[in-house]
Amino acid sequence: MSAAELRALIERVTAAIAAAAAADAALRQEHAAKDQTLVALKDVMRANLWYTEVDVRGQPERLSGLGWGGRPGATDAESPGEVRDLSVAAQTDTSVVLAWRPPAEGGPVASYTVQRRKPGGAWEDVATAVDNDCLLADQPRGIEFDLRVIAVNKAGAGQPTRTVTVVL
């Protein structure tokens, strides 16, 4: 193989490497854009579904025209079940973001009560949420405390979640 042919092959390999790097960068950029769009879609759908759920509460027949129906046997006359998968989603020096999944059983949830206590102390209500997450700002620093969430509706409160322990 001549030196000119070798140089040409090296240039082709170099060009292919550059093209692959550019394609990888474009793929990453498009993937990030897709992720942002999915987050926006999720937020819009969550808001619309929450509004619909509140709007038709107690009248599940209004959803039948859309092909939707409430959970079988779930009514406001039944308190919600236990909130699932409580976790600390984020934490700063003086704040905590809790996230959870709604109950799988029981009546529909109208709101969530977030409670806090020092270990061995009494539970106190610190926040109310209508979504599956909650920011607790201005929390005490340097103190260990337990947090839990309770689902609530007209029929009453469900079972509290397992606790998560936080020290800020």
Image: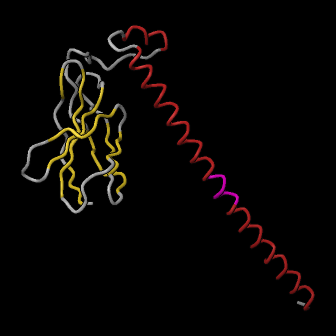
| Count of picture labels | 0
- Which residue occupies the foreground of this view, 25 or 133? 133
| Residue 144, horizontal then vertical, whole percent | 18, 58
| Residue 93, horizontal then vertical, whole percent | 33, 60
Query: Does the magenta stretch mainly form a helix, a strand or a loop?
Result: helix
Query: Does 155 appear above or below 44?
Result: above
Query: Does 38 appear above or below 152?
Result: below
Rendered residue at 49%/14% (across/down): 66
| Residue 95, horizontal then vertical, whole percent | 33, 53
Query: Does 74 appear above or below 39?
Result: above
| Quadrant position of the N terminus in the picture | bottom right
Direction from residue 69 to residue 34 in the image, left or right: right
Rendered residue at 34%/56% (across/down): 91
- Which residue occupies the foreground of this view, 87 or 96? 96
- Which residue occupies the foreground of this view, 17 or 82? 82
Direction from residue 5 to residue 80 in the image, left or right: left
| Quadrant position of the C terminus in the picture | bottom left
| Residue 102, horizontal then vertical, whole percent | 30, 34
Direction from residue 91 to residue 22 in the image, left or right: right
Rendered residue at 90%/91% (across/down): 3
- Which colour style is shown? secondary structure
158 falls in the magenta region: no
| Res. 84 image quadrant | top left
29 falls in the magenta region: yes
Region rendered in magenta: 26-31
| Res. 161 image quadrant | top left
